[in-house]
């Protein structure tokens, strides 16, 4: 039976912009339907239209039928009724979606008491059973806790429990796991799948992650720029995409699937092999050494070596936090090392110590043979440290000064380190911008007018302008759409190849690290738990945590009988970019 | 990662802009008062202190549009000359308090630590004194006139600016773009003064604009008490004071005109200040 039937939905803004253009989709009972697309594709707007959560000035066209109720011309009262009994929604960021001043118990019981007129005790009992259903560890205790006392994953469970209080027939999930770690994501997806099965709900699942959609959805709709580009059986769409857009999207999605490691096919490994034939495993000192660390240390001194780095934050009246514990890495000249870990693993603190933003409590950092442990204080030290190592930050929306144009940002960085005439500097800026795939027009643009990918290119050009020995990239692609991420990654590969740049790449995403890095270390709660060649590490993880990380990554063959060989077909059209 | 998606942008876009007619009227009014003040010597129909003994406390007439006061001086002319001190003094206070406040706020917000704590407590102490009281104290110590109250009010208003600047700078300091500048090798002074400060200036400027109105009202009160500009110089607050005695006799116009002018200018400045901070606030990315 069809729960939701959207046909020819259009949404126009008063300024004549058409945000949704003829969307048609259906969700049947007990079915999970994926809505996949990049930011700005209109997938969230489509989902919100089901609950009537729309911009007030928009003009709608087409129809949205939820069971027997037409949503677009529903009265206010009918809309309320529909939200109370038929459909609920789970939002991306649980911390923003739950009132921080009320307890979890209030959040869960309020709707039951107000909408269904249940007694407080009754509502409480239902809340506890729902919290058990979403596998929250201590429901009784959580009732009296405030959102800030719970982790992101637990809060998302609270949000799911809250959405289930009304026993909805249709559950709309808007990127419910995007803000979460990969292991937490796997748990949340498990809870959602279980609830859907036991309640026979329909589920509309919005995500930008193709692998995730392919892993859990029965059917998917691929959206781009307000249109449905392709639809059909999830496996079919991803294995054999028909629309050009879907093909590009599938190709751009990085995967952790390991094929025969002796024939590396992707550009990343090629690049590494050509620039650095002796890119051996960074010799490990301290920490847990994996079997593969027996490979001999290259004769030349490593470009970056950090030995026994520790950092502890002491907080008044609280337990001290050991952010980084005795971490050691080495990267040979021209090598690329990935540091993988979940939030709170200390990987960013580690990066900040290497670039000189924070002082390590213990340990020794050397870059190109020079001591770079301490935070630089004098002007000379600052400049020298900056020439040793540069960093590209996670969020290009925040790491560029909003007032400074792209060209000026690069020029400033360049002229700080070298005497250049204005005209020479301008010329170099344009060269650099060209190198990162931008042009003349972008030099004059302020960050506000640039897209996320363009901003990250500017940040990259700015870092390269200083011509550092080592480039640290801290989650540098995680805020970007997959297709943009793929472009930025191939850009970094190209620059590595051309300049022999040494890269330290920090990420939560194993697939991205696999694409770019020769070697990888895995961090957990401040310590390095495993290290080795990326391919070996992914193919044959030794530490249980590494195994958990790898198993948590959604793979289309999760619930299918597909094997890795088959999955590799998915990736064949990679050639572009 | 929570990057703003299209849905959020559409939902957050400001509601249909309320008509800014009040803003326009305020700006035009304030502009007119300013021009009248600057060109008073050309525009005023009479010199401010010219006595017309035949028309004492006269009502509005073609010769004296707003009537005359108890000494037969033309109210309109005195209003125009009086606008000079009424506008200049608050302007000076706003300029001085903004400069001092920004410097202290920058120091407290950027350096943090004990400097921040010490400055914070000093601000608390200054906040404890009403600005008017400080100005009266300054007058008692340094004599009547314009200088002492302006200096005192500048000190009294600097903490408002400093607090705002401090909190803006402190939140800006933790942003990745500042870390990016550090990694590039820029020094702290350069980042703070040349990069971060200009980013917070629009908000501080809007706040200072609002201060203008409050200062104007307080200075008018001061000269109403006879502690500001001294007779025979025309000043709005002093004019209200001088016209007091006439009120009993039913001659309310000489007191009403300057009083209404003070209210209107303060309202106009507030409307403009609010609008400015709204516009700037609207530009801050979500």
Image (cartoon, helix red, strand yellow):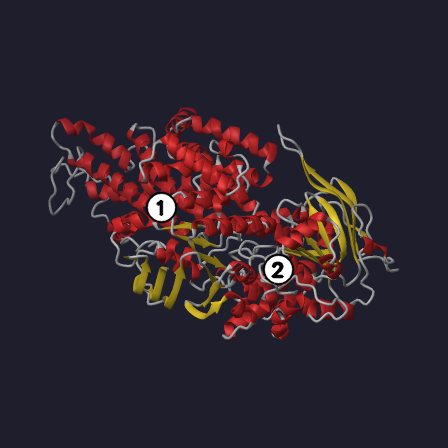
Element type at mark 2: helix
Q: How many callouts does the rendering have?
A: 2
Indicate the quadrant where residue B7 lies: bottom left
Q: Tell which of A257 and A279 is nearer to you.
A: A257
Is A412 on the left or on the right of A140, as rendered?
right
Chain identifier of the residue bearing label 1 in the image: B
Residue A318 vertical placement versus A171 (above, below): above
**Which quadrant, please, contains the C terminus of chain A?**
bottom right
* Front one among A123 and B112: A123
The one nearer the camera, B25 or A341, is A341
Compared to A441, does B125 lie above or below? above
Identify the disc placed on residue A412.
Answer: 2
User: Marks 1 and 2: CB-CB under 8 Å?
Assistant: no
Residue A276: name its quadrant: bottom right
- x, y percent for residue A229: 45, 71
| C-alpha distance separating marks 1 and 2 | 34 Å
Q: Chain of mark 2?
A: A
Where is residue A289 drawn, in percent x and y?
Answer: 80, 49
Drawn side of residue B82 relative to residue A103, left or right = left
x and y percentages locating residue B179 in the rendered image: 62, 50
Apparent side of residue B149 relative to residue B193 in the rendered image (left or right): left
Q: Residues within 10 Å of mark 2 (few under 14, many from 20)?
A: some
Kindly identify the residue that appears in the image at 51 percent across and 65 percent down. A234
Q: Which residue is mark 1?
A: B273
């Amino acid at each position: 039976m069809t729960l939701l039937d959207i046909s020819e939905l259009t949404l126009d803004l008063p300024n004549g912009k058409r945000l949704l253009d003829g969307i048609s989709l259906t969700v049947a009972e007990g079915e999970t339907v994926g809505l996949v697309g990049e930011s700005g594709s209109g997938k969230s707007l489509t989902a919100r239209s089901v609950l009537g959560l729309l911009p007030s000035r928009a003009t709608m066209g087409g129809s949205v039928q939820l069971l027997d109720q037409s949503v677009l011309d529903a009265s206010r009262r009918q809309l309320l009724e529909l939200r109370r009994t038929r459909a609920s929604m789970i939002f991306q960021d649980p911390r923003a979606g739950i009132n921080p001043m009320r307890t979890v118990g209030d959040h869960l019981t309020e709707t039951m008491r107000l909408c269904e007129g249940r007694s407080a005790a009754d509502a409480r009992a239902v809340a506890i059973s729902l919290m058990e259903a979403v596998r929250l560890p201590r429901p009784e205790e959580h009732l009296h806790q405030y959102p800030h006392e719970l982790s992101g994953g637990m809060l998302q469970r609270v949000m799911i429990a809250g959405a289930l209080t009304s026993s909805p027939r249709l559950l709309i999930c808007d990127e419910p796991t995007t803000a979460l770690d990969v292991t937490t994501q796997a748990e949340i997806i498990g809870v959602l799948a279980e609830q859907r099965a036991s309640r026979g709900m329909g589920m509309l699942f919005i995500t930008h992650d193709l692998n995730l959609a392919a892993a859990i959805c029965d059917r998917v709709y691929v959206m781009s720029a307000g249109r449905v580009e392709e639809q059909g059986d999830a496996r079919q769409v991803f294995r054999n995409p028909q629309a050009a857009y879907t093909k590009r999207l599938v190709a751009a999605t990085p995967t952790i699937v390991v094929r025969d490691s002796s024939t590396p096919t992707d550009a990343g490994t090629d690049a590494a092999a050509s620039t650095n034939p002796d890119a051996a495993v960074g010799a490990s000192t301290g920490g847990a050494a994996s079997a593969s660390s027996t490979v001999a240390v290259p004769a030349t001194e490593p470009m970056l070596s950090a030995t026994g780095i520790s950092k502890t934050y002491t907080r008044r009246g609280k337990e001290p936090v050991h952010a980084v514990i005795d971490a050691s890495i080495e990267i040979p000249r021209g090598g690329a090392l990935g540091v993988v870990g979940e939030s709170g693993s200390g990987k960013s603190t580690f990066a900040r110590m290497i670039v000189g933003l924070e002082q390590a409590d213990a340990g020794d950092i050397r870059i190109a043979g020079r001591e770079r442990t301490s935070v630089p204080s004098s002007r000379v030290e600052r400049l020298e440290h900056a020439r040793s190592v540069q960093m590209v930050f996670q969020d290009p929306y925040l790491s560029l000064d909003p007032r400074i144009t792209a060209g000026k940002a690069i020029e400033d960085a360049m002229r700080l380190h070298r005497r250049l005439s204005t005209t020479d500097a301008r010329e170099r800026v344009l060269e650099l911008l060209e190198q990162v795939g931008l042009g003349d027009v972008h030099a004059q643009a302020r960050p506000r007018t640039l897209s996320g990918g363009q901003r990250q290119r500017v940040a990259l050009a700015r870092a390269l302008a200083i011509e550092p020995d080592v480039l640290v990239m801290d989650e540098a692609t995680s805020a970007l759409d997959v297709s943009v991420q793929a472009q930025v990654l191939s850009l970094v590969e190209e620059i590595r190849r051309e300049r022999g740049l040494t890269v330290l790449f920090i990420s939560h995403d194993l697939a991205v690290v696999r694409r770019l890095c020769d070697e990888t270390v895995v961090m957990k709660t401040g310590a390095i738990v495993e290290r080795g060649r990326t391919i070996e590490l992914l193919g044959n993880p030794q530490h249980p945590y590494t195994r958990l990380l790898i198993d948590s990554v959604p793979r289309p063959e999760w619930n299918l009988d597909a094997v890795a060989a088959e999955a590799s077909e998915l990736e064949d059209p990679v050639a572009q970019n | 990662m929570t990057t703003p998606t299209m849905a959020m942008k559409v939902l957050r876009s400001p509601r249909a802009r309320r008509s800014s007619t009040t803003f326009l009227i305020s700006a035009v009014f304030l502009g007119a008062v300013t021009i009248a003040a600057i060109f008073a010597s050309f525009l005023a129909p009479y010199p401010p202190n010219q006595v017309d003994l035949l028309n004492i406390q006269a009502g509005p007439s073609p010769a004296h549009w707003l009537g005359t006061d108890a000494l037969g001086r033309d109210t309109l002319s005195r209003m125009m000359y009086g606008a000079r001190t009424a506008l200049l003094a608050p302007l000076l206070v706003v300029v001085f308090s903004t400069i001092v406040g920004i410097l202290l706020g920058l120091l407290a917000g950027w350096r943090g630590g004990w400097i921040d704590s010490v400055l914070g407590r000093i601000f608390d102490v200054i906040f404890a004194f009403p600005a008017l009281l400080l100005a009266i104290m300054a007058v008692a110590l340094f004599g009547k006139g314009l200088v002492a109250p302006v200096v005192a009010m500048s000190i009294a208003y600097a903490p408002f600016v400093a607090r705002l600047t401090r909190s803006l700078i402190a939140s800006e300091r933790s942003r990745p773009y500042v870390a990016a500048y550090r990694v590039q090798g820029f020094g702290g002074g350069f980042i703070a003064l040349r990069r971060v400060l200009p980013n917070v200036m629009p908000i501080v400027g809007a706040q200072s604009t609002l201060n203008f109105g409050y200062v104007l009202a307080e200075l008018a009160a001061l000269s109403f008490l006879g502690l500001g500009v001294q007779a025979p110089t025309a000043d709005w607050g002093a004019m209200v004071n001088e016209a007091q005695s006439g009120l009993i006799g039913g001659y309310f116009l000489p007191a009403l005109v300057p009083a209404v002018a003070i209210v209107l200018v303060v309202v106009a400045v507030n409307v403009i200040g609010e609008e400015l901070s709204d516009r700037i606030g609207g530009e801050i990315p979500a």
